[in-house]
Amino acid sequence: MGTAIRKVEKEEVWKLRHQIMWPDKEFDYIKLKDDHVGIHYGLFIDQNLTSVISLFISNDEGQFRKFATLQYEQGKGYGSKLLDYVINETKKSGVKKIWCNARENKVNFYKKFGLQATDTKFIKGDKSYIIMEKYL
């Protein structure tokens, strides 16, 4: 089984976002108004898109959003591999800080990559989030 990571088009990430994150919502719900300026990455297993993440760079900060892995492939390290790749690519581009709005139940996952929880928390929909960041 070969894995590969590459930049993908926003339309490719939309399909997985909808399938994984919000299957009960209309398709347009998963689109971000700034998707056209994002850098979208996908991890492929044998040519099949398995995990996606979108990166938005503004000045010297990068925010990653809409990080999702197919349900049946979760827990196998694919998301970790993709996030590690994106953090390294972000660092190479001269960005000074990377951050995300992490679901509170995923804080420990992001800590493995050196992200630290901030004091900023919020609720969106029925989910609790905390902003996590890492200086590169």
Image: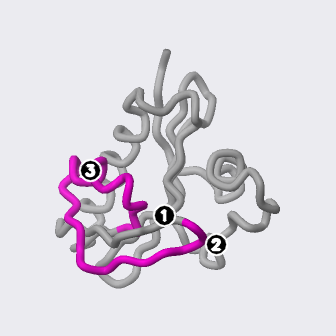
Q: Which residues are magenta?
A: 100-126
**How much space separates mark 2 and mark 1, taking CA atoms?**
10 Å
**Residue 30 occupies which quadrant of the picture?**
bottom right
The furthest residue to the bottom = 59
The mark nearer the N terminus, 3 or 1, is 1
Toward the top, the furthest residue is 1
Q: CA distance from mark 3 to mark 1?
A: 17 Å
Q: Mark 2 or mark 3, which is nearer to you?
A: 3
Q: Position of residue 37 (x, y in %)?
A: 56, 74
Q: Is residue 58 magenta?
A: no
| Image vertical order of residue 110 relative to residue 42, above or below | below
Q: Is residue 55 left or right of residue 44?
A: left
- At x 35%, y 40%, the residue is 80
- Whether residue 113 is situated above or below residue 101 in the rendered picture: above
Which residue in the protein does label 1 denote? 65
The residue singled out by tag 2 in the image is: 32
Q: Residue 99: horizontal and vertical position, in percent?
A: 32, 69
Which type of secondary structure does the marked residue at label 3 adopt? helix
Q: CA distance from mark 2 to mark 3?
A: 26 Å
What residue is shown at x 48% (from left), y 33% (from top)? 74
Residue 103: x and y in percent read: 42, 61
Look at mark 3 in the image and give the residue it sits on: 108
The tag on residue 12 is none
Q: Nearer the viewer, residue 26 or 51?
A: 26
In contact (CB < 8 Å): disc 2 and disc 1: yes
